[in-house]
Image (tube, rainbow, N blue to C red):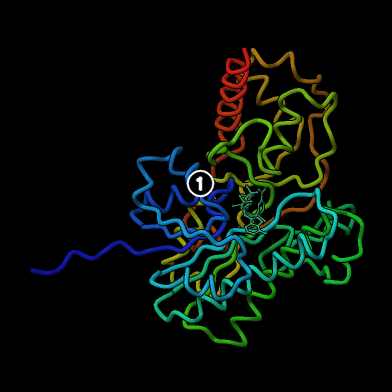
Amino acid sequence: MSAIASPSIVFVTGGNGFVGTTTVLELIKRGYKVKATIRSQAKADAFSKQYPAQSSSIEWVIVPDLTNEDAMTTATADVDYVIHMASPFHFNFKDSVKEVLEPAKEMTVVTLKAAAKHPRIKRVVITSSFVAVWDLMKDGGLWPGKTFTADDWNPATWEQGATVPNPFFVYSASKSLAEKAAYDFVQQEKPSFSITTFCPPIIYGPPQQPEVTTSNLNTSMNIIYSVLSGQAKEYPATGLPVFVDVRDLAYLQVAALTNEKAANQRYLAISDHWYFEELAQIVKEEFPEQASRLPLVVRTEGPVHFDFDVAKTERDFEIEWIPLRKTIVDTMKVLYAMEKEEKAGKA
Ligand code: NAP
C-alpha cells in the first residue's frame, strides 16, 4: 500500500497583509500547509480568530525582525516553497533609508539567504511591483506610446531613493532595488531553488485581512476608498492608471510555486487600465443608493498613457483576468458592508 503524500508546506512572509491574507487563503484552498512569519502573537491570534477553519493549516512563527538571518534560517526549515510578500508599503516615513529602502532589500536578501540553506526548497516567489518596472519620473509617469513588458526596469538608484523627496519615488526605488538584489543573489549564489517575481500595479479587491476596518485599509485600498466613499470633493488625477485584482495576484503567486516555466522568470501582473471617474461611474450604476455621495462624473476618458504587454503571463499561467467592474463591485460591497457595521457598532 503506498503512503499518502503529506501536503507541501509553503513559508510565507507578510501573510497577514492585504495581498498576504488573500494569498494564504488561496494556498490553503489549493491544499497547501502554510508556515508564516508574523511580527507578534497578537497578530497571529487575530488571524486565527478571523479564520478559525483555516487555522489548523497555518503554523505561525513570531519573527519581529525579518532581517535576522538566524531567526529566518530556523523559520524556513522543513518547507518546500517560499512566498515573500513583506515589504514596507506606506508613505508616512521619516527616514527613507532606514524605514523603506533598507528593510525592503534586506528582508528580500535575508529570506533568500535563509532559504538557500535548505535544499528542500524548490521555488521562492517574490511580490515585487510594477513600480519596479516603470519610471514615474518620466513624462509624469504616463509615458504615452510606451508598451511596458517584464523586461523593463525602473532605473532608480539607491542614492536617488535616499535623496529624492517624493515618498512614492522612494517606495518605487525600494521595490526595484529589492527585486534586482534577488536576481543578483540567484546569479551569484546559484541556490538550489529558482525564483519567480511578479510586478503588479495598484492592487484592488475585497480586503480580507484580520481586523481590517475602513480606517486601517492598506495603502492601495485606501486610495480608492477615500474617493469612492465621497471623502474627496473632486476626482484626483489618476497617476497609475493600471490595476490587478488581489485574487488574480494570489492565484498567480500560488500557481508559480510549481510552474516549471516560471523558473527565474519575471512577470507583469496587470489586468486592465482604469481611472477614477470610471470607478465612480461603475459605483453609480451598481450601487445607485451611494451615487449621491460622489462628485459629478464629467471626464469620460482617463489620461493618455502607456500600454502594457502581459502575453508572457497569460501564456505561462493561462490566466483570465478579473475585469475592472467585477473587482470594483466585489470590493465596494465589502467596504460598504464594513461601513454599515462600523456605524451600527458606534450607535
Ligand atoms: P500591507 O497590507 O501593508 O501588508 C504588508 C505586509 O508586510 C504586512 O504583513 C506587514 O506586517 C509586512 N511588513 C511590512 N513592513 C515590514 C517590516 N519592516 N518587517 C516585517 N514585516 C513587514 O501591504 P500589501 O498591499 O498587502 O503589500 C504586500 C506586498 O505587495 C508588498 O511587497 C507591496 O510592495 C506589494 N505590492 C502592493 C501593491 C498594492 O497596491 N497593494 C502593489 C504592488 C505591490 P505587519 O502587519 O506586521 O505590519
Left or right for 325, reference 118? right
Q: Residue at x 58, y 55 (%)?
A: 39
Q: Quadrant of residue 145?
A: bottom right
Q: Nearer the viewer, residue 65 or 2?
A: 65
- Looking at mark 1, is its residue's CB closer than 8 Å to ligand 1? no
In the figure, 332 relative to 98: above or below?
above
Left or right for 286, reference 306? left
Q: Residue at x 66, y 38 (%)?
A: 217
Q: Nearer the viewer, residue 272 or 173?
A: 173
Q: Residue at x 81, y 53 (%)?
A: 93
Q: Nearer the viewer, residue 312 or 46?
A: 46
Q: Quadrant of residue 304?
A: top right
In the figure, 190 relative to 275: above or below?
below
What percent of the width, then of the height, locates residue 121? Answer: 43, 74
Q: Residue at x 69, y 32 (%)?
A: 215
Residue at which label 1 appears: 22
Residue type at numbered disc 1: Thr
What percent of the width, then of the height, locates residue 129? Answer: 67, 58
Left or right for 286, reference 224? left
In the figure, 322 relative to 14: above or below?
above
* Residue 144 visible in the snapshot: no
Q: Quadrant of residue 180?
A: bottom right
What percent of the width, then of the height, locates residue 160? Answer: 88, 67
Q: Callout 1: 10 Å neighbours few (<14), some, many (20+)?
A: many
